[in-house]
Amino acid sequence: MRRILTMLVFLVVVFPLSALEVSDNDYLVARAAVTDCALAVTAGYIADPQYFMPGCTLGQETIPRTLMVVQSDLSGYSPMIPAKIGNQTWYQRLASQTKGPLDDQCRTILSVHDWRKGDILLSGTYRADWPKGSSVVTLVAQAFARHFGEVTVWVDLLLEGRRISRPIRVSGTARIASEGIVTDGLEFRYE
């Protein structure tokens, strides 16, 4: 019995639990949480009037480069997006799309992922490297045209909550290009 206990202690010391590879389920949930947070904050920032996600703070630059999140619960994001008004004329739909160009997409993604209170809490930082000479107007126009320069986003986040088996550290770089979000530069590991 003593040998078995000694062997178990030895294995835990040599191969710490944080070295375990993140499970497929935890990876998918973490990846969705990281992108949902970024999308929701972006949707709120470019909307007119702006709205903000709970636990999220943007930097004060002309185009914010830094997003800091502190125990930001994804379940609180959907209620922040202005409600979609039904039975609108085509002109009213166009006007509401102009005021919140990412609202519909954000609303759809958040409803599909169905975040509940305590499912995922994010803490950490996103930092974007915008193309030289960019403004909010040019970035939105380029996004609508689906042709813009690549944006690199450095990520350092800790994810906790009921939808993942253990806290996960997400760090590295993601790229946003005309083709979409590329997350192959992100590392997902148990904390």
Image (tube, helix red, strand yellow):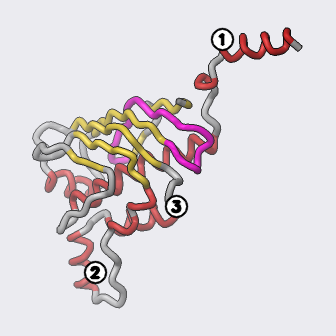
Q: Is residue 126 left or right of residue 73?
A: left
Residue drawn at the location 59% of the way across and 45% of the way down: 164
* 26 or 146, nearer to the observer: 26
Q: N-terminal of the two: label 2 or label 1?
A: 1
For residue 14, the mark is 1
Residue drawn at the location 14% of the way across and 56% of the way down: 137
Q: CA distance from mark 3 to mark 2?
A: 29 Å
SS for tag 1?
A: helix
Image location of residue 190, percent across then percent down: 56, 31
Which mark's residue is nearer the viewer, 3 or 2? 3
Can residue 182 be found in the magenta stretch? Answer: no
Magenta stretch: give its range: 160-179
83 over 165 or under it: above or below: below
Task: Point out the image quarter for the N terminus.
Answer: top right
Image location of residue 5, percent across then percent down: 80, 15
Q: Residue furthest right?
A: 1
Image location of residue 54, percent across then percent down: 33, 56
* Residue behind mark 2: 93
Q: Could you tell me the amino acid type at mark 1?
A: Val
Count neighbours of disc 2 (C-alpha within 10 A) and say few if under 14, some if 14 to 19, many if 20 or more: some
SS for tag 3?
A: loop
Image location of residue 114, percent across then percent down: 52, 63
* Residue behind mark 3: 116
Q: CA distance from mark 1 to mark 3?
A: 37 Å
Q: CA distance from mark 2 to mark 1?
A: 60 Å
For residue 168, the mark is none
Q: Is residue 5 left or right of residue 186?
A: right
